[in-house]
Amino acid sequence: MSTTRTERSKDTQGESLHHEDLSISQILKERGVSRRDFLKFCSTVTAALALPPSFAPSVAQALDEVKRPPLVWLEFQGCTGDSEALLRSANPTVAEIVLDILSVDYHETIMAAAGHQAEAALDKTITDYKGKYFAVIEGSIPMKDGGIYGCVGGKSNLERARQVCGGAAATIAIGNCASYGGIPAAAPNPTGAVGVKEAVPGATVINLPGCPCNADNLTATIVHYLVFNKIPALDGHGRPLFAYGKRIHDNCERRPHFDAGQYVEKWGDDGHRRGYCLYKMGCKGPATFHNCPTQRYNEKTAWPIGSGHPCVGCAEPQFWDVMSPMYRRLPNVPGFGIEHTADAIGLGLAAGAAGAFVVHGALSAMRKDKEPGEDAKED
Ligand code: SF4
């Protein structure tokens, strides 16, 4: 990180630091990232993109040749959790590689420059690289009262978003707040908070919701753009299908316990210690589309359900309103089947989530409660 800060400091003094003549692999070599680590990174990101392992050499070859694009990262109404997630990524740190792959010209949380110097760096990047830079937006955008509830450098978040996202090759809305409004947009939404796409409808926006977003999905999205020269396929909520195309419930390691009717009934009970299903403790995995079970966090060692906590549905639109209370089980409303996609479920996901699911759960429980030989008695 210190190298990047030094670079940024120089950048604000007017020196060209984009290394337009160097490929990404050359830059990584300069920074001491070994070829082995680079290839390992390519394999990891290929897996994150849900591509077969045989694609890894193609990803490496593409990154060998592509030039690194500039990126600006704006912090609006959010908790900075997504920046934290990026900076605490795995080894060889994805953060290091991302920050070396990208020329992060402006990031309010980590940049050394401040005040007018920082604003000048931002203006220079979006002018010099119009249509070529990436914008990453963290946090929601307050729309009420002309957007006065979020201002940086005398400009409202809304004004900045229109200016920056409007000229970007692509905008990544990182985290649930930037994607859909998140906590600031929860009722009664006093600042009129919305996600980036709602605030700047004309921008090309990729939503990476989560609270926080998994940094590996950010890396994979950027690499996808660099390798294929286009944004990844998105679902109806603007999320990349490679990361949000599958339901947590269908990939969950506790699923066999759900099928067997084995549930945690209260915190710390025997079922909890044995890793039983968390549905009765409020798990929203049956209504949430995300690659948490496979991508995981902390060097792929852990994820919430694996650690004994129910999924809270943080990758879904308006999850603070539609998925709460956090520890109450999904309501029993018909209309949900295992074949459904995120698009089919739509915004009513929580309401429609548990029909077949609850019936299935009840049947599983009945099966479990039957005594051995009971079927024979019924015959
Ligand atoms: Fe996993 Fe939750 Fe589904 Fe249980 S309800 S199998 S814990 S996703």
Image (cartoon, rainbow, N blue to C red):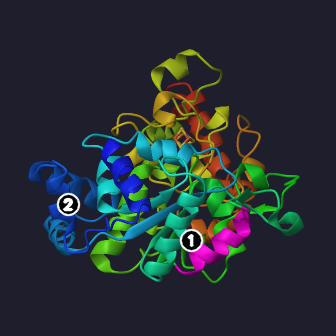
> Residue 238 has which mark?
1
Position of residue 228 in the picture relative to residue 85 (left or right)? left
Q: Are marks 1 and 2 in contact (CB under 8 Å)?
A: no
What residue occupies the far left of the structure in this picture?
35
Q: Position of residue 80 (x, y in %)?
A: 58, 45
Number of residues whose C-alpha sits closer than 10 Å to that of mark 2, classed few (under 14), some (14–19) or many (20 or more)? some
Q: Amino acid at mark 1?
A: Gly
Position of residue 177 in the picture relative to residue 125 (left or right)? right
| Towards the viewer: 347 or 156 | 156
Secondary element at image label 2: helix
Label 2 sits on residue: 27
Residue at 38% in and 48% down: 5
| Towards the viewer: 365 or 12 | 12
> Residue 28 has which mark?
none
Position of residue 28 in the picture relative to residue 337 (left or right)? left
Position of residue 160 in the picture relative to residue 171 (left or right)? right
Residue at 10% in and 50% down: 36
- Quarter of the image where the N terminus is located: top left
Question: In the image, which residues are magenta?
Answer: 154-167
| Distance in Å between CA atoms under marks 1 and 2 | 32 Å
Residue at 46% in and 21% down: 274
Secondary element at image label 1: loop
Q: Looking at the image, in which quadrant does ligand 1 appear?
A: top right
Q: Position of residue 160 (x, y in %)?
A: 66, 69
Q: Is residue 350 above or below residue 79?
A: below
Q: Amino acid at mark 2?
A: Ile
| Towards the viewer: 310 or 28 | 28
What residue occupies the far front of the structure in this picture?
13
Q: Is residue 107 visible?
A: yes
Q: Is residue 249 magenta?
A: no
Q: Quadrant of residue 202?
A: bottom right
